[in-house]
């Protein structure tokens, strides 16, 4: 087959997939062994065979989870708008890397322009910003900057011979902090998980208590990691108060807004982020709440100069060739970096801030809508009051003795039947159904359908 024929087939495949992405089941579920056996013939390859290639593509799509489906509630991201998908396809086709201006001239200009605009929205107009490979990477980079703040020059000298550093995040924060503290050499035993209150927000009294305790133990407070939209409950830590504590103890203050940072675009809900302008850094994933294809993550720093100080290392004369060119590579943790700006730029251009703001407002409203359904049903129990689109609940009934097992079974069977796909988590040791509202086109009818599916599956198991 010629290129054109394959490209036509590609377009037809995309068209068909996108047309039906919201129909039928969320997933054509097969357990691991069955799916592995089914895909095994694909390994008998014949090189240069286009038919086999398309057979693999068809199988891939057939068994992939339809993350754009209105009953996909499993992740903090879902769906993708057409403008941003076009951006993703075009940037993949042009296949360039963000490290140098000469290899990515247009993308470099677009990235600098959009980040400048977003810095103003965050309140860091004099600061700096970069795209990262994800929210986890944003937390890691913030920890590197914090390490340098407390021990200037430590990106050169390392930490040997210095008092141990201590990092503080809430016990509901994301596990990427545990990875970051390992990667930065600070060591996992120096990560302190602060208590959270009933709503899931960090308890600042416990924070200060823990800071005083580690100082007595001879450690040096280094970074407080607040969260804007925790992974399970969607809680927002009290940033204003944390900022004062960070200032008092000379800590770097980072806000992890991977999931809930998008409320910065909403006039109605941005008070959840009050105090963000006092943080040293803020990370935010546009691919989560806003409906862009994965990944689209940004890190903002209130003051300029940190990226150069901490990340611009090594002999790079073979790649970065001149001061007149705004090469972005020196300021990333890695070398090659995918172009994530085009999809974000096109989305911003096509829908504007107002269009994105209405997505955020819609998801928060739908969170309240789901809350009411749960509170009005005698067999549903709300396990935590929703802040945004994280709904934590379970089915209860006098006949059910083991609620964890029962709810897990209902959730798994809904998943395997392909009707609705949620996640689960544990809150204070109890299993909770974790219904995540993240799709930018989600409607109240989709939530009604979910609860109909869930309740009828639960009732089937009772009888
Ligand atoms: C609060 C929080 N921070 C960080 C992350 C990690 O983000 P990423 O998957 O972009 O690395 C997540 C992911 O769900 C998250 O919920």
Image (cartoon, rainbow, N blue to C red):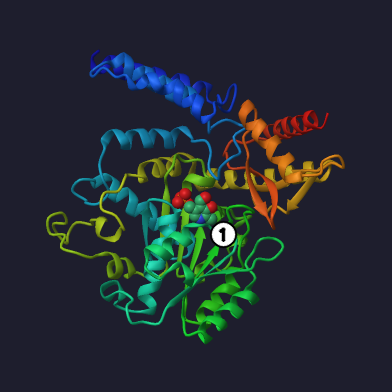
Left/right placement of residue 395 relative to residue 356 reads right
Above or below, comparing residue 115 to residue 249 in the picture: above
Image quarter (top left, top right, bottom left or bottom right) of the C terminus: top right
Q: Is mark 1 within 8 Å of ligand 1?
A: yes
Local SS, label 1: loop
| Residue shown at 37% from the left, 66% from the top | 184
| Residue shown at 42% from the left, 78% from the top | 164
The picture places residue 444, in percent across and down from the top left corner, at 70, 36
Q: Is residue 290 visible in this depiction of the protein?
A: yes
- Along the viewing direction, whichever of 348 and 227 lies nearer the viewer: 227
| Residue shown at 74% from the left, 52% from the top | 383
Count of marks, rendered view = 1
Q: Which residue is mark 1?
A: 228
Q: Is residue 65 visible in this depiction of the protein?
A: no
Residue 92 occupies quadrant: top left
Above or below, comparing residue 299 to residue 418 in the picture: below
């Amino acid at each position: 087959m010629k290129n054109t024929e394959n490209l036509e087939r590609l377009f037809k495949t995309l068209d068909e997939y996108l047309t039906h992405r919201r129909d039928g089941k969320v997933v054509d579920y097969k357990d691991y062994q069955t799916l592995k056996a089914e895909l095994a013939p694909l390994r008998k390859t014949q090189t240069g065979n286009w038919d086999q290639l398309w057979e693999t593509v068809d199988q891939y799509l057939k068994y992939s989870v339809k993350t754009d489906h209105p009953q996909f509630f499993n992740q903090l991201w879902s769906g993708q708008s057409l403008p941003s998908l076009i951006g993703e396809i075009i940037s993949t086709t042009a296949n360039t890397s963000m490290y140098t201006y000469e290899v990515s001239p247009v993308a470099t200009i677009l990235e600098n322009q959009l980040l400048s605009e977003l810095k103003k929205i965050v309140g860091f107009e004099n600061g700096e910003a970069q795209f990262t490979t994800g929210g986890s990477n944003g937390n890691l980079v913030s920890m590197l900057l914090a390490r340098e703040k407390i021990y200037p020059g430590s990106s050169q000298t390392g930490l040997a011979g210095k008092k141990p550093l201590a990092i503080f995040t809430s016990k509901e924060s994301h596990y990427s902090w545990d990875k970051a503290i390992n990667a930065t050499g600070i060591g996992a035993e120096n990560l302190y998980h602060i208590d959270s209150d009933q709503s899931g927000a960090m308890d600042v009294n416990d924070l200060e208590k823990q800071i005083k305790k580690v100082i007595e133990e001879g450690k040096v407070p280094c970074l407080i990691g607040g969260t804007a939209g925790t992974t399970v409950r969607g809680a927002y830590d009290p940033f204003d108060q944390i900022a004062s504590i960070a200032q008092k103890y000379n800590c770097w203050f980072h806000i992890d807004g991977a999931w809930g940072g998008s409320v910065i675009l909403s006039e109605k809900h941005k008070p959840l982020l009050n105090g963000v302008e006092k943080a040293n850094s803020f990370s935010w994933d546009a691919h989560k709440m806003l409906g862009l294809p994965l990944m689209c993550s940004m890190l903002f720093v209130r003051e300029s100069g940190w990226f150069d100080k901490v990340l611009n290392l090594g002999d790079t004369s073979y790649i970065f060739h001149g001061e007149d060119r705004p090469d972005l590579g020196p300021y990333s943790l890695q070398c090659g970096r995918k172009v994530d700006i085009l999809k974000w730029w096109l989305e911003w251009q096509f829908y504007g801030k107002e269009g994105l703001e209405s997505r955020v407002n819609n998801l928060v409203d739908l969170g309240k809508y789901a809350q009411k359904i749960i509170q009005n049903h005698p067999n549903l129990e709300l396990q935590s009051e929703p802040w945004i689109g994280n709904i934590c609940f379970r089915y209860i009934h006098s006949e059910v003795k083991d609620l964890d097992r029962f709810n897990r079974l209902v959730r798994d069977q809904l998943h395997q039947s392909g009707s609705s796909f949620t996640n689960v988590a544990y809150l204070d040791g109890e299993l909770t159904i974790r219904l995540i509202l993240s799709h930018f086109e989600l409607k109240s009818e989709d939530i009604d359908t979910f609860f109909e599916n869930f309740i009828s599956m639960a009732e089937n198991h009772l009888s």
